[in-house]
Amino acid sequence: MIPDALIQAWPAFRLSLELATAASGFVVLLGVPLAWLLATRRFPGRRALEAACLLPLALPPTVLGYYLLLLLGSSGPLARATGLQWAFSFPGLVVGAVLFSLPLSLSTFREVFLRLDPDLLDTARTLGARPLARFRRVVLPLAWPGLLSGAVLAFAHTLGEFGVVLMIGGSIPGRTQVASIYLYDLVQALDFGAAGVVAGTLLAVAFVTVFAMRILEERWRSASPSRTR
């Protein structure tokens, strides 16, 4: 039988899963092209761009959340320019989760591309394949387990995030109260029994996602030819 505490926590878990799914999707859409650019091109400002992308790794999550609150709040530049106010809303949570999870996945994606054998791409180029066709027919079939691993990493990282989502979203039930925030509220209310159930469920979900990520990484490393260094 499902514990009552878990039934009551389901809206928060559902919101966490929706957030993690949306964030990991955007991380793939943004991170894969960016990682390919950083791994295969040399251009002025590349190091600065890479440092800016990795900056959230060195920032406390609350600092990133604070600046996002200023950016997306009712008096921020987004609201002034478009009338949209994403602070304390699900879209704001997605923006924060993407920025917070992108650096880790970007590093994974970049390493995937760096390990590809450049001779395969050169061969495809000499056979007349255009860049998009080379990427679709050569790169993706070899790199997809590693790219999927990076997406799973973003998913797991978002599930466990607390500081950014608290700053940008607060704790509004059904709108911004994800599982990590719900757990914090339970502890604040001294409801340690329910908190234990929620924490144990988060622990189990995190273990499964990390285990899946490691399997994908091993599959990619065993199947993908490495570039000669």
Image (cartoon, rainbow, N blue to C red):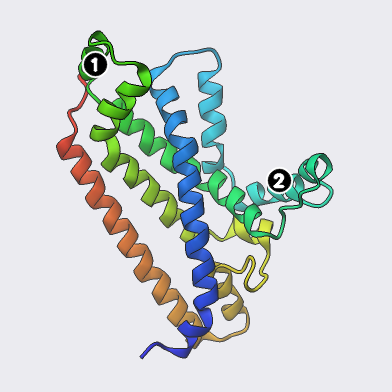
The three-letter amino acid code for the residue at tag 1 is Ala
Point out residue 152 in the picture as x, y percentages from the top left corner: 37, 51
Viewer can see residue 229 = no
Between 200 and 31, the residue placed more toward the observer is: 31
Q: Give the image quarter of residue 32.
A: top left
Tag on residue 124?
A: 1
**Quarter that holds the N terminus:** bottom left
Point out residue 229 in the picture as x, y percentages from the top left corner: 23, 19
Residue with the most extreme top position: 126
Mark found first going from the N terminus, 1 or 2: 2
Residue ID at (32%, 64%): 207
Q: Circle 2 — which element?
A: helix
Residue ID at (46%, 49%): 24
Q: Name the residue under label 2.
A: 67
Nearest-to-viewer mark from 1 and 2: 1
Tag on residue 195?
A: none
